Structure formats: structure tokens, C-alpha cells
Image (cartoon, rainbow, N blue to C red):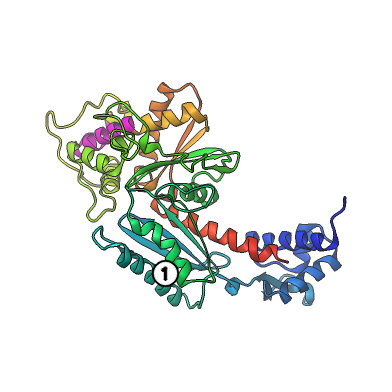
Amino acid sequence: MPASPSTARAINDRLALGLLQQRGPLTAAQLKQLTGLSRPTVADLVERLSAAGLIAVVGEAGEQRRGPNAKLYGIVAGRAHLAALDVRTEGVAVVVSDLVGEVLAEASVPITGDAGTGPAVEQAVALVERALKEAGADRLHTVGIGAPGLIDPATGELRDSGALPAWHRRLVAALQERLPEARVSVENETNLAALAEQRDGAARDRDTFVLLWLGHGTGAAVILDGTLRRGTSGGTGEIGFLPVPGTSGLPSATDCTGGFHSLAGAPAVAELAAEHGVRPDPGADPEAAGAVRAAVRALAGKGAVGEASSGEASSPGQASAAESAESADPASVVAGRFLDDLADRVVVGVASVVALLDPGCVVLGGEVGQAGGEALARRVRERLVRMSPLPTEVRPSALGGAAVLRGALLTARDQAQDELFGAR
């Protein structure tokens, strides 16, 4: 059954807007060539989208003859403004962008554990309002929020959890109340990081992969055949609760102590670094990422991380022969042993994910995963080959801790464009 004229127009409009989003400003002739539509159809959609305030003339194509086809059309970036929030247990970061994703303002504020729910929510909302003002915008069309914890698939709301600050759940309602015209949505932070790595980061060439988040906490995001999988209760990827060897006990329904988090969460990594005498970069957040970054730098011969002494570090048995031969200075030896031991821990989680999902690719994300870079990813990969028969790439994050904000912004932009572009 052929599409109705209105449906055909909507399809053509969305196709043209998608090309303008992906490629930037285009002439009518270029739109005709890329869409395969006739010249009258392209002229009609250009007029329609211009009248709707979605596109405008932004210049001329110098290499073409002057005239209507030489005009360059682009999306009106100021047609809508978006905000993305990265909500952590210790603070909030926000960016405000235009419709095409250009960041216009960014800010962050620490929120201490003793701030209280009301004051904490007020600090976060005031931060968004301040960033909006700095961006020169008067209102927000869409707000995307990344937060730790489970998102209820039925309601899209952050589920109640005693492990997270109460102000997290109150924030969404407060933003909706103070910004009544905005569409506000919340997503698990690790899921957003995975979406960002797939669009702009280490997994751009993968339709199926798992992001293993290594930061203040641990988590995993699963993307299969291009689709983010959340699970029945929104709990897919709660790998911090995975029972693993090498811990003092088993996790409980309310506490992941004894699970994978006890091996690879930031506190455990910082403790491991201290045992090896690895000093983190001053002011690093989390401290664990600073220690990993210092170790990687020491391996490259760019700085000391500590002093080696007999019996203070573990055996370098799993370090590569080449590294052992090249590590003439004590700092490099210490750094290598620390990263070896860290890889021994991380691979436990990676091997579990691979055995269950066979994703073919695991990205080590979060601040620790990015800090470890290829040095940590290679160590994990070498261990995984010995533990699993399933061929799996292990890649370092390209975005690290910034992936949550990037993912929230991409999600907000997609939602806004779906509504604005789909309305034609």
C-alpha cells in the first residue's frame, strides 16, 4: 500500500534533516543528489522546513554557480536548547547545547553527603538554571540525566535504593517543576556511557559489545545488535553484585561488598595501588584513576610512581618478557606489577560477561578504564585468551568519565530531534 502524501512528506523531511544533521549545511542540489528525490520535491521540502523554522540559509556554496541551488541550508541550531546532567553521589555536572549538539555552557558543583535532600536538589537545579543563562537561552526543550542505580523500564523513573542519596530521585521531579516546558528523562549512567562509546568512542564499529565501567563504582552496559538491553527490571549489567573469588564473602541484595565491586571498584583499586607503593596524581578523581594513570606513565618512562623494595610488590610472573627486560628502573617494575594485579582482577568480570553473552568486544570504560588505556586493556586481553575460548577484543575507553555526559547529551538531542523533525 503506497504511503499517503502527508506520510511521504514526513519521510522526505526526516531524510533531509538527517542528512543536514550528519553532513552539515547542504545545497538543494546536494540534497537532491543524496536523497534521490526530484528537484520539485526537494524545493517543496526546503520551503516547508524553512517555514517551520527548522532550517535556514546559512551561506552559499562558492564552487557552484550563483542562484537558488548555490544557497547552503543548515539546521537552525537555536531552534531548541538541550541540557545533559551527570549525577554522581558526590556532585553534578551539566552541559547545555543547541539542537545540533554544540556545547554552549558547562558547569559542575560538588554536593556533600551531609547537604540534606532539599539543599542538594536546590544546588543541582540552580546549577542547571545558571548554565542555561550562561548559554544565552531562555528555556530548555529536553533534559537528559545520567545517574547511578536502576531505571524502572515501565515508568522510566529512577528506582528507590538505600545505597544512593535521596536527592537523586527528587531531582527529576524538581527539574520538571522548575522547567515545566522541558522533557526530562533519566537513564543509567553506564548505559549512557555505552551509547556514547558506540556513537563517538571506542565502539564506533561495533553493533554488539559490552562496556565494563570502572570508576567510583563498577557496572556494565550491554548492547546487542545495536540495541541497548536493560533487562526485565532494568538491572542488566549490575556486575558489581557478581559473586567472584578473591573477596571476603558474598554480596547481598542491598550491598555489593563481596561482589566484583570489591575487586575492581575505585576503593579497591586505590588500596591495591597503595599496597604496591603507587602514588596517584595529585587531585585525581577518583584517586584510583590517578594511580592507574601514574603507573601507565611510569611504564612509558615518564615519571616515578613509587619505590620498589624486597617483598613489597607481588611477583611479576605475568608481566610480558619484553616489559620485564625493558624495566630497568624500580618505578617501572612497580608500575608493571600493579597493572598486572589489577588486570588479574578486571579479567574476572570480563570473563564472566564473555561467557554469558559472547559479545566479541569489551570496552574498559570509566575513569579507571580510560586511565589504564592500552596498557591495561592488553593485560586483560592476554589473560582473557587463557580463560575463554571465545574470541573477544578488549579495548580501552576513548571517552572515560566524560562518556556519561556525552551519552546524556546525545540522548537528549535524539529525543528533541525526533519530536521536532518528526512533526513535519
Q: Quadrant of residue 174?
A: bottom left
Residue 180 pos. (x, y %): 51, 71
Where disc 1 sits, the SS reads helix
Q: Amino acid at mark 1?
A: Val
Residue at image point 51% right, 52% down: 156
Residue 61 shows up from this direction: no
Task: Count residues near mark 1 (Cα–Cα under 10 Å), then give few for <14, some for 14-19, many for 20+.
Answer: many
Count the numbered circles shown.
Answer: 1
Q: Magenta stretch mostly in which secondary structure? A: helix
Q: Is residue 294 found left or right of 99 in the rendered image?
A: left
Q: Is residue 350 above or below residue 203?
A: above
Instruction: Place residue 166 in its image quadrant.
Output: bottom left
The residue most toward the left is 310
Q: Position of residue 80 (x, y in %)?
A: 57, 71
The stretch in magenta equals: 326-345
- Please tell me which residue is depicted at 27% across the width and 40% down the height of the picture: 269
* Front residue of this view, candidates 380 and 137: 137
Along the viewing direction, whichever of 101 and 188 lies nearer the viewer: 188
Taking depth in this image into account, of 179 and 324 the one nearest to the observer is: 179
Q: Residue 179 at what x, y percent from top left?
A: 48, 71
Which residue is the site of mark 1? Answer: 128
Give the residue displayed 46% in from the left and 41% down from the top: 235
Residue 331: image x %, image y %? 20, 39
Rendered-image quadrant of the C terminus: bottom right
